[in-house]
């Protein structure tokens, strides 16, 4: 499925939502005139995004920007009560894409825990197979201009997460994060939180050239580290007629990167511990329709990161511009879903109170 087909799929609801029969499903009573709660229904959402992390690693005497050959990814999101789970799907690549940029294998799992005031995210991401985006800076004699030097055995393991707290009880994070609520009136909130990531990068010892030859490098690096970011920002949701909305946000923060650089040269290794301090600004907007049964929309994000990797260090940054499109539907939750969640709520009563 290419990008044009994906956009077409998400335009379909624009034509069919007017025919939607707005049946008032049993929503959870809420005293707030700002929020309508639908967390007792099973929300299933299909999404497509280009959101990913770019890496900058030492290569020859400069920095190579490496990327996976998965510019677009798809996912299914299942949300019920306080829990939201996303399973990623890998798109099929053409033979030319595989030849020019190599094969990428990836496993991605994301879980969110959403409460009245707190939102927590936990994600695991394993990726194998990358290419050098700025190949032209290192190779001048490549015949095929579309070919990129590849790291077929380069692996990244990342365990990341985030926690944030909203200061306005009338503002719904769930309406944006899991679609288990509907924002009824316009309002905004200050929001404070932190992101963190444990990461491991290795397998830079072999590269694949244009003639498909595997070249063993005599000097290369492995990396591992921990990177927390602390931020405070402001989010606002404008609500228009018949469940249409526009959300904008700005989250400035400060981050730290504590990592180990293991340098291999001619069979010998040397370990170095490094610390970077950087500033980060995340901003963006989202717009869509959040009805009682059908919901759909899109998000654009802009990320700025002041961290500039030097020639002998690792750079780890989200891409600057990213988009996210989605379409979802609310169903009556089956027993296979309700019973396990009810069991968890009985064992952990604070989840049932949903007041954290």
Image (cartoon, rainbow, N blue to C red):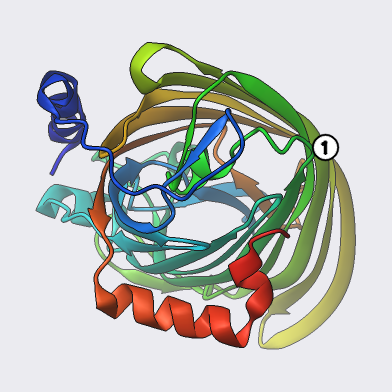
290 or 282: nearer the eye? 290
Location of residue 318 in the rendering, given as x and y in whole percent from the top left corner? 59, 44
Q: Is residue 101 above or below residue 261?
A: above
- The extreme top residue here reads 241
Q: Residue at x 65, y 78 (%)?
A: 349
Image side of residue 314 versus residue 79, left or right: right
20 or 64: nearer the eye? 20
What residue would you read off at disc 1? 232
Check the picture and name the quadrant holding the N terminus: top left
Residue 145 visible in this rendered orientation of the protein: no
Check the picture and name the quadrant holding the C terminus: bottom right
Location of residue 118 in the rendering, given as x and y in whole percent from the top left corner? 70, 54
Q: Residue at x 40, y 47 (%)?
A: 27
Residue 116 visible in this rendered orientation of the protein: yes
Location of residue 128 in the rendering, given as x and y in whole percent from the top left corner? 41, 70
Image side of residue 327 versus residue 340, left or right: left
Q: Would you identify the image quadrant in which residue 329 lies?
A: top left
SS type, badge 1? strand
């Amino acid at each position: 499925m290419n990008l044009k087909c994906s956009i077409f799929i998400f335009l379909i609801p624009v034509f069919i939502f007017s025919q939607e029969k707005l049946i008032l499903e049993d929503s959870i009573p809420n005293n707030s005139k700002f929020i309508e709660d639908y967390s007792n229904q099973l929300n299933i959402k299909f999404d497509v995004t280009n959101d990913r992390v770019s890496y900058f690693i030492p290569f020859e005497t400069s920095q190579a920007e490496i990327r996976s050959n998965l510019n677009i990814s798809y996912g299914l999101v299942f949300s019920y009560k306080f829990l939201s789970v996303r399973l990623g799907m890998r798109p099929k690549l053409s033979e030319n894409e595989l030849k020019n940029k190599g094969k990428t294998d990836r496993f991605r799992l994301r879980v969110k825990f959403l409460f009245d005031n707190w939102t927590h995210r936990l994600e695991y991401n394993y990726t194998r197979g990358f290419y050098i985006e700025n190949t032209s800076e290192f190779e001048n004699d490549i015949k095929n201009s579309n070919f990129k030097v590849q790291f077929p055995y380069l692996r990244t393991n990342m365990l990341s997460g985030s926690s944030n707290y909203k200061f306005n009880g009338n503002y719904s994070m769930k309406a944006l994060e899991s679609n288990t609520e509907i924002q009824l009136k316009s309002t905004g909130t200050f929001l404070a939180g932190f992101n963190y990531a444990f990461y491991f990068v290795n397998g830079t010892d072999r590269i694949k050239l244009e003639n498909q030859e595997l070249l063993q490098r005599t000097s290369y690096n492995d990396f591992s580290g921990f990177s927390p970011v602390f931020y405070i920002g402001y989010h606002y949701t404008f609500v228009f007629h018949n469940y249409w909305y526009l959300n904008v946000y700005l989250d400035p923060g400060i981050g730290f990167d504590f990592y180990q650089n293991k340098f291999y040269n001619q069979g010998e290794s040397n370990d170095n511990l490094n610390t970077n301090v950087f500033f980060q600004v995340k901003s963006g907007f989202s717009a869509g329709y959040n009805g009682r049964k059908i919901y759909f929309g899109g998000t654009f994000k802009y990320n700025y990161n002041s961290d500039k990797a030097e020639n002998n260090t690792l750079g780890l940054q989200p891409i600057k511009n990213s988009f996210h499109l989605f379409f979802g539907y609310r169903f009556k939750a089956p027993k296979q879903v309700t019973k396990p969640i009810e069991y968890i709520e009985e064992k952990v009563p604070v989840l049932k109170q949903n007041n954290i």
